[in-house]
Amino acid sequence: TCQMSSIGTGYDLYTTSYSPDGRVFQVEYAAKAVESSGTAVGVRVKDGVVLGFEKLIVSKMLVEGTCKRLMTVDEHVGIAVAGLLADGRQLVNRARDEAASYREFYGEPIPGKVLAERLAGFVHAYTMYWSVRPFGSSVLVAAKDKDGTSLWVIEPSGLTYNYLGAAIGKGKQASKVELEKLKLSEMTCREAVNAVARIIYSVHDDVKDKDFELELSWICEESDWKHQKVPSDLVQKAAQEAKAALEEPAED
């Protein structure tokens, strides 16, 4: 007799079979794979969008800035990838193709909503055929269009949500608790950079995980409404303040 692995007992071998209680186990496992990476945090504030990532450093020999988790799709769109980076890379390439073809066909930049929905449709297609596996990554999509800025999450199931503040990856739950305390509608991007850094430092697990590199990017007036890395002096300042904030309670 064949031993069925895991809790799916045979219903988890393909995405094309439902379990008797209506679950698609492979898609659930893909969502679990997203937790294999550091945490990505995104916030939409009154004057722009900020993305941050806790990039875990796997080796001391790595060149700084390699294996980027925050990537530019088009001038006005940035993506943060949590989970399996190779899978996320494919999604970023797909997003770049979608942005380029939209620009060619309509003669204007792709709106955030359109890109998020097209990308979600692509992700969803990979949950429907036995010959492929679902993506093991979730992405945050930050965009600026004529309706303003927006922040989207796309999950391995192909669902997409529009958020004011969102987190994906290992520290998702802890970050969510912290995000809910922020008054995002009153915040500026400069303040958001510090807030995102603080959240990432607070959810970082010192015991289990080694060092990490803080990645920050934004779309705001200061970046001329383009997706760009936050200047390194601001990143360093935000990191210092975040570390100081962590040490404060210990002094009491």
Image (cartoon, rainbow, N blue to C red):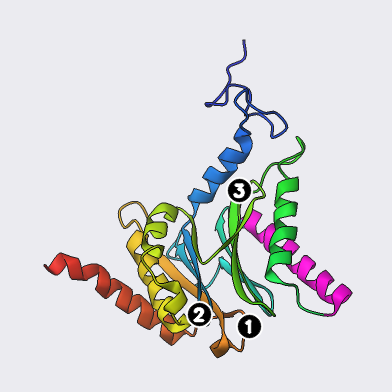
Q: What element carries label 2?
A: loop
Mark 3 neighbour density, 10 Å: few (under 14) some (14–19) many (20 or more): many
Query: Do the residues under discs 2 and 1 have CB atoms within 8 angstroms?
Result: no
Q: Which residue is drawn at 42% across and 55% down?
A: 171
Q: Which residue is drawn at 42% across and 80% down?
A: 235
Numbered tag placed on residue 136 in the rendering: 3
Residue farthest toward the top in the current orientation of the protein: 1
Q: In this view, does 121 lie above or below 199?
A: above
Q: Is mark 3 on a helix, strand or loop?
A: loop
Q: Which amino acid does label 2 sit on?
A: Lys
Q: Which amino acid does label 3 sit on?
A: Gly
Q: Which residue is drawn at 57% across and 39% down?
A: 28
Mark 2 neighbour density, 10 Å: few (under 14) some (14–19) many (20 or more): some
Along the viewing direction, whichever of 200 and 150 lies nearer the viewer:
150
Magenta residue span: 86-107
In the picture, measured across the screen, residue 211 lies left or right of residue 32, that is: left
Query: Do the residues under discs 2 and 3 have CB atoms within 8 angstroms?
Result: no
Hey, which quadrant is residue 183 in on the image? Answer: bottom left
* Number of numbered tags placed on the structure image: 3
Q: Which amino acid does label 1 sit on?
A: Lys
- Disc 2 designates what residue? 46
Hey, which quadrant is residue 179 in on the image? Answer: bottom left
In the picture, measured across the screen, residue 37 lies left or right of residue 125, that is: left
- Residue 187 place in picture, x, y as percent: 43, 79
Numbered tag placed on residue 226 in the rendering: 1
Q: Is residue 92 found inside the magenta-colored segment of the image?
A: yes
State the CA–CA distance, disc 2 to disc 1. 16 Å
